[in-house]
Image (tube, rainbow, N blue to C red):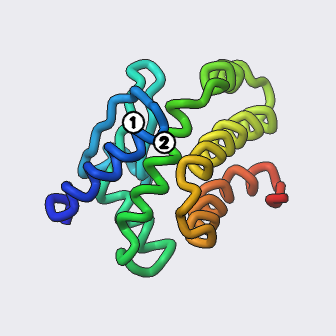
């Protein structure tokens, strides 16, 4: 599956890098090396976005009961990770996260980091199906909000 879509994935990567102006290094991997279903991650130390194809596929299938919109789902996940890469507040928020005393403070900082990345993704993808993207964002932020017992505005 991954090999069949590589050309399309590379096109999305090039287009979003150009649109965002990001200089982040991009890596496409088959599997996330942990026990979570993480579609991507951003490493501040190396300014690298890594995307995990199998996990993105699983997330897409779980959320939409189909892989029909895999390329759109990949695009949204990538835009979100670019949001982390280009977040001017990320280093400060990450440092704050490390120094938080209460769990509430940690949860609020983590939520802010994710909300910043999603705000960037929405600006980067103005033509993306709004309902599709909003469903992804809602489910992505849900665990953070549940920890805080906060509903979206």
User: Residue 140: image x %, image y %?
Assistant: 60, 56
Residue ID at (54%, 62%)? 127
Q: Are marks 2 and 1 in contact (CB under 8 Å)?
A: yes
Mark 2 to mark 1: distance in Å? 6 Å
| Residue 145 vertical placement versus 106 (above, below) | below
Q: Is residue 144 left or right of residue 21?
A: right
Residue 111 figure quarter: top right
Residue at disc 1, secondary structure: strand
User: Residue 26: image x %, image y %?
Assistant: 32, 36
Q: Is residue 112 left or right of residue 9?
A: right
User: Residue 106: image x %, image y %?
Assistant: 73, 33
Residue ID at (41%, 52%)? 39
Return the mark for residue 81.
2
Q: For label 1, count other residues whose C-alpha is less than 10 Å away and answer few (under 14), some (14-19) or many (20+).
A: many
Residue ID at (46%, 73%)? 62
Which of the image's four quarters has the N terminus? Answer: bottom left
Which of the image's four quarters has the C terminus? Answer: bottom right
């Amino acid at each position: 599956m991954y090999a069949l879509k590589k050309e399309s994935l590379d096109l999305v990567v090039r287009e979003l890098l150009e649109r965002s102006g990001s200089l982040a290094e991009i890596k496409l991997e088959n599997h996330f090396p942990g026990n979570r279903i993480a579609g991507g991650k951003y490493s501040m130390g190396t300014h690298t976005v890594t995307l995990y194809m199998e996990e993105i596929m699983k997330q897409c299938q779980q959320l939409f009961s189909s892989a029909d919109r895999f390329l759109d789902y990949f695009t949204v996940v990538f835009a979100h990770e670019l949001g982390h890469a280009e977040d001017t507040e990320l280093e400060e928020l990450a440092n704050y996260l490390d120094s938080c005393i209460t769990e509430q403070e940690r949860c609020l900082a983590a939520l802010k980091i994710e909300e910043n990345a999603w705000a960037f993704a929405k600006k980067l993808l103005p033509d993306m199906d709004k309902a599709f993207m909003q469903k992804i964002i809602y489910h992505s932020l849900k665990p953070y909000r549940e920890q805080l017992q906060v509903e979206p505005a």
